[in-house]
Image: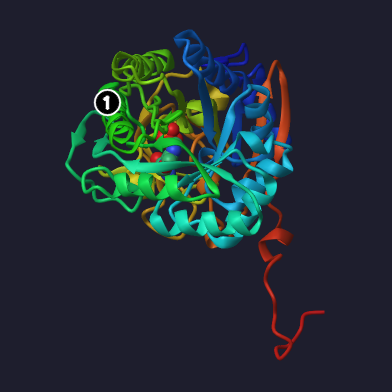
Amino acid sequence: HGTSKINDQGHLEIGGVDTTKLVAEYGTPLYVFDEALVRQRCREFVEAFTASGLKFQVAYASKAFCVMAMCRIVEEEGMSLDVVSDGELYTALQAGFPAERIHFHGNNKTISEIEMAIDAKIGCFVVDNFIELQMLNAIAADKRQKVKILLRITPGVEAHTHEYISTGQTDSKFGFDLGNGSAFRAIQEASELSHVELLGIHSHIGSQIFEVEGFRMAAEKMAGFAIQVRTELGVTFKVINLGGGFGIRYVSEDTPLPVAVYVKAITDAIKTNFGSNGYPLPEIWVEPGRSIVGDAGTTLYTVGTTKEIPGVRKYVAVDGGMTDNPRPALYQAVYEAGLANRATEQPEEIVSIAGKCCESGDMLIFDVNLPKVASGDILAVSSTGAYNYSMASNYNRIRRPGVVFVQDGHSDLVVNRESFEQIVGNDVIPARMKQVS
Ligand code: LLP
């Protein structure tokens, strides 16, 4: 998919670049992003919303993959950006991302994060709880500013990949509950504060969702609430933000719908539930993360050792693992892989891909069908663009891999592989200990 194909040498090629050449140039492990596919996903969202005729913002959820070059792409594609920490905010600002298009999320924003964001003049805070609401108002008052906010609502809809549940009240650390009246009280409180401007409400019902039903339900609940608030408090929302969560294909059994189908379900639900009630059609915002970058990312590894336990399993170890992709260990996430240097060869054996970390749980893939694997082969694991680099760690003091963007036959290094100097860069040997010369 995307620009991936097998070239005349029988090698996996992405963005017109032979992956074995990438390995020769940058080493492994290496994250490779198909830039054309990232931009295509951005455009699918923007075009589908444009077609709806509603006012909208598509805010890329940068937690999925937040580096400066990615912020540049999001900016160029005319989208907004959702950040959840001072680190993500700093990255966006350093990349020259327009502050007014930045939305700040999170259930425990610190005073210094709020100050940094107000000083930068970001576009909107998504306020999560009563303490934050008061704190934000007070800090804004100190700075003689008025800040735009959405309130994060827990709508009582929770979507999973193939199912959704609707509960009166959800047990979640995030947001103001719809069911127990705290969302209503938050609106009341926010509309009385003089240094915040309440734009509307936000919900996020889950991640890696395949079906449109959950989004439709969330839109309906938000609309019902908006109408109640308008009737009882005279407050009209300009913005409804329905969060992210659009599913992607990790393995062939995954069947996400085209982006346009999710967007249409959402915009139709908004039109039906707002317009028909004489409620002025709100702007609709979404926050896709995974669906922008997930399937555009591929991780390349070099195969090292193997261990065969007759009748049980063959382990094939690669030069990365849970440090660059913690998702299998954390969520039992599944992936597909192939040999990038022998991409036309027929599968011959079922093996399991192990990482190099010192723990048994460091497995990337169980039971993948590959040609006879040998030391030195290049393994390509697909759909690793979201929540891989961003969740990578230095466990075992392994250096985080570099990241390259490929397009039109060119590769650009957008994150250097970490250096040994960086590994010890923050370490301090106390003066009372013997110093190294
Ligand atoms: N908006 C909010 C408020 C969110 O909490 C999230 C994700 C998103 C947007 C973006 O969701 P997406 O479109 O990427 O599904 N580390 C996990 C995923 C955690 C998602 C957390 N919130 C993973 O690797 O699957």
Image position of 406 with respect to 105: above or below: above
Q: Residue at x 41, y 52 (%)?
A: 362
Of residues 209 and 333, the one drawn nearer to the viewer in this rendering = 209
Tell me the crowding category of disc 1: few under 14, some 14 to 19, or many 20 or more residues within 10 angstroms, Cα based.
some
Residue extending farthest top: 51
- Whether ligand 1 has any atom under 8 Å from the Cβ at mark 1 is answered as no
Of residues 416 and 17, the one drawn nearer to the viewer in this rendering = 416
* Element under disc 1: helix
Horizontal and vertical percent position of residue 195:
55, 49
Q: Residue at x 35, y 39 (%)?
A: 333
Q: Could you tell me if residue 303 is visible in this image?
A: no
Q: Could you tell me if residue 414 is visible in this image?
A: yes
Residue bearing the label numbered 1: 220
* Quarter of the image where one finds residue 121: top right
Image position of 141 with respect to 64: above or below: below
Image position of 393 with respect to 333: above or below: below
